[in-house]
Structure formats: C-alpha cells, structure tokens
Amino acid sequence: MMTRGAKGGSDASNAQTADRNLPGEGALVKEDRYLSDVCEASPIVLHDRLLLMECIRPGSGGSKKDYYIAIKDAETGGEMARLATGYGLASAWVHNDEVYVYASRWQGGTWNDVTLFRSGDLRQWRRQKVIEQDPPEHIFNTSVCEAYGKFLMAYETDDPAYVPFTIKFAQSRDLVGWKKIPGAIYGPDKYAACPCLRYLDGRYYMLYLEHMKPQWRFETYMVRSPDLKAWEPSPRNPILAPGEGEDINTSDPDITEHRGRVYLYYSIGDQRTYSKLKRAVFNGTLAEFLEWCYRK
C-alpha cells in the first residue's frame, strides 16, 4: 500500500543497489518487467491455476465506483471476475476451492473495517463485514493464512495509540467469524505496514513494509514469531529493497506457491504519485523459501 491518498515520488538519488543480500542461485530473483499499474495484488491458486487478485483504485480521491477488485489469470491477464465496488487494499485466500477476499471499505476519504467477499464459482459473491475498526483507528491492508486448524489475519491500522502504521491480528475457525487477539501486535513503535502472513512448523512468518527513516525509502522485511507477540527478524533483511528502475519503494508483498515455485508480488514506485506491480520468483517451495529467509 502506498501512502494513504496516493497509489504510490521521486527521489531516485536515495535508491541504492538492489538485492544486496539476494545474489546467486537459490535466491529470490526479481523479474525484469512491470506487470501493471496496480499497487495492491494477491496471488492465489485455484484448481491448479495461478490467479491474481488486483485492487483497482485511483491514485487519490475518486468516487465509490472507481474502487473495485478484479481477479485475473496471472499469465494471460484475462479478467475472470469483478467484485466489491467501493472496496480495496484487499487480500485473498483459497480454501476448499472457495475464494475468500478480505477488503477494506473506502469511505470519507479513508479506509474502514474489513468485509469478506466469498465465492465458489467467481460469479456469485456473498458479502459479510468481519472486522470492525475501533474508532478513531482505520483499517488498511490485510493478510490471511492457515495455522494448525485455525485461520489467522494480520491487519494494518493507524491506531493513534501507536506509531502509524501498526499490525494487529485476529483468528477464526471458519474464515467467516473473526475475533481480535488481545496483546498480539507488531510495530507499535515504528512504521510497519502491508503485512503478508504465513505459517510453518509452529511459527508465523510475516513480510511487511518498513520506512527507512530519515530517507524517503521503503523496504520489505520479514519477522517470525511463535505467538504473534515476540518477534525475530530475518538475518536476510531486507527481503526486498528498491533497485534499478524501482525508485524508492518495494511494498505490498504477497506470496503463493505454485508448482514448486514461490511467486512474490510487490509494488514499486515513489510512495507519492505512482506505483507499478512487479514479481519475484523463488525456485523452491514456500517452506524452503521461509527457511531460506532465516538461513545465516
């Protein structure tokens, strides 16, 4: 997610050499292409087909009709579904061949609560609000994963009790009814945005965006935790840093595994006026990628 009110500035002098900890084989390799002008996107696999959920929205302003979600074939770009007018900053998850899209509502010039849109055929969508914001906070990006028979959600908030932005958590038994987890939080004392949450062997792994103050520069980091309260940073951080042609930003990470490879979608740009979607690939499973992120 780019700075609120804009999709994505330019201070290219701050852009340093990319991938300073990602060289060679067995690493995360950035593809040398732009996919679209979308900022927030979420890859999913449905019936062994790689799909991409894209959040369509203007850089700033606009009316409700300018905000919606599209689901496309990740390789051809063909649109398969359009839904959720007036919503964005969404994430997607597939369970038992049903697609679950969690989206924030655009109203009053900002983002509010979280609504679930779910469908088994990508045509008929059921809608239900699942996370209420605690005023005066607003809710932005989300991410969902499965863990030991439960489902966990990370959601980004501007709760004024903490440094904006901060990541909170909720849990569910069925992906529909969600309860916030008291005391579970990440980044109360710093900018921590755009979560992507996964689970492996007793630990939660989370990609998120850090503002590299005092520079106007944004990089994707990883942390892991056994309990969503005590967090360990990856020795490979930053997992994604802006490189040539990426300006000062690598934000909004989201990942999936498909046919033995990990696809990591992310947004580049200036955090003020524009964004473009890119993809990085790890030649291995999701478990291997998460383990690689903590290999010293």
Image: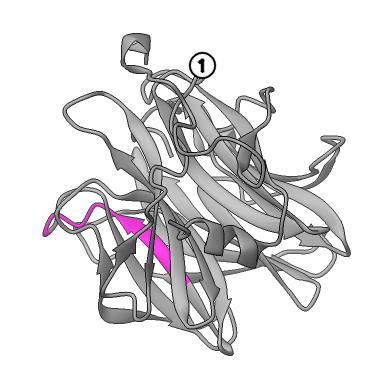
Q: Which residues are magenta?
A: 153-161
Quarter of the image where the C terminus is located = bottom left
Q: Nearer the viewer, residue 159 or 214?
A: 214
Residue depicted at x 38% and y 56%: 234
Q: Is residue 132 visible?
A: no
Image vertical order of residue 53 relative to residue 172, above or below: above
Residue depicted at x 14% and y 56%: 162
Residue 110 image point, x, y percent:
34, 42
Q: Is residue 221 visible?
A: yes
Amino acid of disc 1: Glu
Q: Nearer the viewer, residue 167 or 260?
A: 260
Question: In the displayed structure, does residue 207 sit left or right of residue 167?
Answer: right
Residue depicted at x 16% and y 27%: 214
Question: In the displayed structure, does residue 5 sit left or right of residue 120?
Answer: left
- Count numbered badges in the picture: 1
Question: In the displayed structure, does residue 217 sit left or right of residue 240?
Answer: left
Q: Quadrant of residue 132?
A: bottom left
Quarter of the image where the N terminus is located = top left
Inspect the magenta stretch and tell me whether residue 286 lies in it: no
Instruction: Give the colour scheme of this rendering.
Output: one colour
Residue position for label 1:
244
Residue 113 image point, x, y percent:
39, 61
